[in-house]
Amino acid sequence: MAIEDNPISRVRYGEELRRRREAAGLTQEELGQRVAMSRTHIAHIEAGRRRPDVEDARRLDRELGTDGFFERFLPALDGRKVAEHFAEAAELESQAVAIKQYAGVLVPGSLQTPDYAREVLSSGHPAKSDVKRDSLLVTRLERARILDNFDSPRLTVLLGEAVLRQMIGGAQVMCEQLRRILELGESRRIRVHVLPFTAGAHALLEGPVKLMWLEELPPVAYVEGLKSGRIWEVQETVRELEDVYDHALGDALSHRKSLALIGSVAEDYEHETQREHEPDNCLA
């Protein structure tokens, strides 16, 4: 899902950052060193091509003495509501030419079916109204549009077996969700690998990670926790996270065996659906 930003606001944000930086007598490199951001990131923000996250903006405000200006300006850049910590990652996802992602418990957002996504969005705390939930649902489902182009992004998904087994919304919902992943894998739109329970301890036990490669920028990584997330741009760190991902991938099933397992679990859910005497099944 692309963030629907206001291009004029982005340009103005960048112009104001450049003006404040130059007034402070700092180069992009010097400012980047002081606020733990790369010179490239600073340059792209000033050119209106990148959006700083909240922590970036707060560090800029502290360093440049701008009394919260850059943090307060952030809402003007976005036209859609996503979790604050995910905003920049969602934008990068829409620009990526290749993505490698690990999910340990939930199906990644860009692969979720409407019913699965609705159940996930209904489960949060505090509870959301139906109107707010459905608004978030539309935004989440639009992220799946990155799959409309067969060639880009190249998507590799590493799933913990718990993703297949965790019952979200009941057998019918799970059956349809796994069939969706199976369809994408069999059509060669995505590569899927499952880390089976039998793999035991593996390199990505600590949580989800997403690695993204972009056409004109160095690769970045996104690491997420409960109501938090961080974009990593420092290339040494990105390479370390890629190495961790590859290490865990080595413990996973092959693409073909993963699809076979996903298909088998989907059949189990279909049989469960039939036992529950539901009128429809996901193969109809």
Image (cartoon, grey):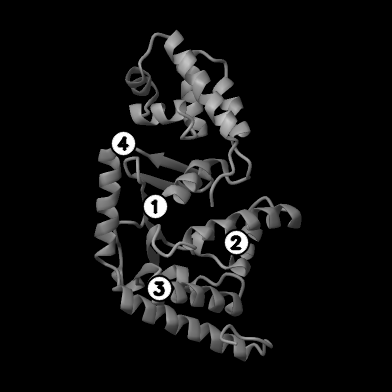
From the image, tell me which residue sits under label 4: 234
**Picture layout, residue 79 above or below residue 109:** above
Q: Distance between the residues labelled 3 and 4?
A: 32 Å
Q: What residue type is labelled 1?
A: Lys
Q: Earlier in the sequence, mark 2 or mark 1?
A: 2
Picture disc at residue 185:
3
- Count of all numbered marks drawn on residues in the image: 4
Q: What residue type is labelled 3?
A: Gly
- 3 vs 4, front mark: 3
Q: Earlier in the sequence, mark 3 or mark 2?
A: 2
Image position of 139 (left or right of 257): right
Q: How far apart are marks 1 and 3 (CA)?
A: 19 Å
Q: What residue type is labelled 2?
A: Val
Label 1 crowd bin: few (<14), some (14–19), many (20+), radius 10 Å: many
**Foreground residue among 245 and 125:** 245
Q: Which residue is drawn at 55% across and 72% down?
A: 167
User: Could you say whether the residue bearing mark 2 is in a helix, strand or loop?
Assistant: helix
Picture disc at residue 210:
1
Q: How far apart are marks 2 and 1 (CA)?
A: 19 Å
Q: Earlier in the sequence, mark 2 or mark 4?
A: 2
**Foreground residue among 234 and 244:** 234
Picture disc at residue 96:
none
From the image, tell me which residue sits under label 2: 120
Q: In the rendered image, is residue 213 in sight? A: yes
